[in-house]
Image: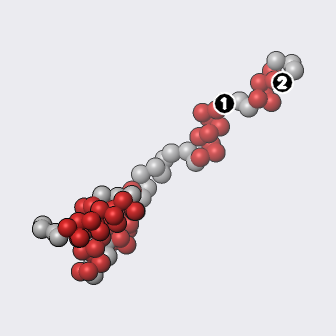
Amino acid sequence: MYLTDEQRRRLKQRADDAGTSEAEVVRQILDEALGIDDSVDELLAAIEATAGICKDYPDWPEWLRKVRGKGADARLKELGL
């Protein structure tokens, strides 16, 4: 792709401002100009692809209790303190 010096300068500035690559900025500009909005479709595909993969895992509080073990109060009681 051939760009003018001014286009390159502005592209670099926009990428720097956004903290992303120039290629990503070009893709965003093209998507906007071409009316492409895959964000919803991509999100739904990710949800569908991952839904239920952890259905047999314990919930967070249960897992955390198992990992941490007894609390400080229980350990102190066992020590008679």
Q: Type of residue at label 2?
A: Lys
Rendering quarter of residue 18: bottom left
- Give whichever of 43, 62 is nearer the camera: 43
Farthest residue in the left direction?
2
What residue would you read off at disc 1?
69
- Give whichever of 8, 61 is nearer the camera: 8
Q: Earlier in the sequence, mark 1 or mark 2?
A: 1
The residues tagged by marks 1 and 2 sit, at their Cα atoms, a distance apart of 14 Å
Q: Position of residue 61 (x, y in %)?
A: 64, 45
Farthest residue in the top direction?
79
Q: Position of residue 39 (x, y in %)?
A: 35, 70
Asked if residue 24 shows in the view, the reply is: no
Identify the residue shown where x is 26% and y is 80%.
33
Residue 14's tag is none
Identify the residue shown where x is 43% and y is 55%.
52
Q: Is residue 16 above or below residue 39?
A: above
User: In what element is the residue under mark 2?
Assistant: helix
What residue would you read off at disc 2?
77
- Give whichever of 79, 3 is nearer the camera: 3
- In this rendering, would 22 be left or right of 78? left
- In this rendering, would 74 be left or right of 19? right
Category of crowding for the residue at label 1, using alpha-carbon neighbours closer than 10 angstroms: few (below 14), some (14–19), many (at least 20):
few
